[in-house]
Amino acid sequence: MRYSVRLFDPASGKVRQLAAEAADETTLRASLPASGEVVVALSAQGGAGWMARAWPSQFDVGLLCTELARLLRAGLTLPEALETQSGRVQGSSRTVYANLQTRLLEGKRLSEAMQLADAFPAVLIAAIRASERSGRVPEALEEFARYDASLRELRRKMINAAIYPSLVVGFGFLVSLFLLGYVVPRFAQIFSERVAQTSHATGLLIALGQAINAHPWRVAGGALAMVGAIVLLVANPNFRTSLIALIARAGPVARWLRTLQLARITHAMAMLLANGFPIPEAMRLAQALALRPDLMRAMNQATDGIEAGQSASAAWSRGGLADGYAARVLQAGERTGNLAACFDTLAQTYRLDVETALERASRIVEPVLLIVVAALIGLIVALMYMPIFDLASAVS
């Protein structure tokens, strides 16, 4: 296999790149000349299997933070930790590790390397920049890993809550399509003499079933096209943003989204304050997590109030960011001098509120959807059996 190798010479400070052939990476590293140069990047050129192309690996920021923190606590330096970890990953992740290692060997700090890589959130870069002054880089990495893990867990619960309703609706649609396209036309053939005498609703049902039965491939193509259009629209960021803005106008959903964003903001505040950021600067960085315009205005107002000399609890209360519970928690943090822990407490509380609301909504939506789908299928079956009921009445 052909490899592209990038070498760094500590003596001259130069980086050179070469191409080499080897059976695997271990053989290639062993065959490189022992000239004092450090391997900063090593990637395979071509030869990727169809599975690797079909399912490209995605860069995981939380995993990088977890692994780097573990290796740093084991005594490795940052370049050594990046080089060690890059040998365990594939695809785009390896490129990110190699770029970070190259910039560290060029003399840049980790926060600068992350900023130049353009693959890391601003909150993490700010926390690393602050921790570099105090020597708490492993702690900052672990704190962001916990922050990322909590968001992933919440996202996983949201996806799981949406899977069951989607399956119910999809299954109900398929059953209804089968009844209309296959069963209804055959019932219409059996009771052809009674079709003209059936009710208007039954006549419409039979006409629809016969139309579906006459053009099955067109119906299947239309259904597939509709599903594809929905997938493309959901994948469009502009449409997704507009849809979320439309759904967010509903009162319960608006409160739920606000709580979700407050959970992210307070968690980011806890991480930034723990790494030595002053409150106004931490709030400006955490403001990027506020997606609602009213929440952004509240963050600006609270930041201005803190800069004007107000306490954090008073500024958050006047800005509409804190209710009575949050204000009392922040006041306790001001008395003890540990606002970071108080913001972390608020983040956990808000996250629990979101999970509770999500669980309650799923418990309500799931049976409602089941009732609606069952009622729709039952209506089709009842209308389909109307000719039988009419025939039984005529015989009696």
Image (cartoon, helix red, strand yellow):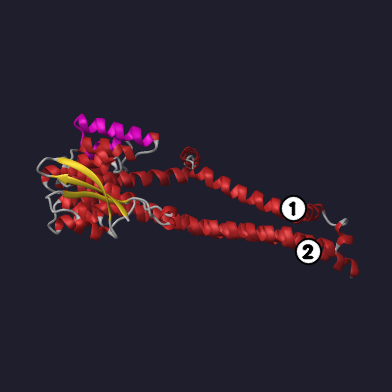
Magenta-colored segment: predominant secondary structure: helix
Q: Earlier in the sequence, mark 2 or mark 1?
A: 1
Question: On screen, 393 above or below 280?
Answer: below
Quarter of the figure with residue 71: bottom left
Quarter of the figure with residue 273: top left
Helix, strand or loop status at disc 2: loop
The percent coordinates of residue 98 (x first, y second) are 25, 48
The percent coordinates of residue 74 (x first, y second) are 14, 59
Q: Which mark is residue 215?
A: 1
Residue at point 13% right, 54% down?
A: 34
Is 156 displayed left or right of 313 in the figure?
Answer: right
| Circle 2 or circle 1, nearest the eye | 1
Q: Quadrant of the C terminus?
A: bottom right
Question: Observer-nearest residue: 372 or 100?
Answer: 100
What range of the chain is rendered magenta?
294-318
Question: Observer-nearest residue: 11 or 170?
Answer: 11
Residue at point 24% right, 31% down?
A: 305
Q: Which residue is mark 2?
A: 385
Tag 2: residue type?
Tyr
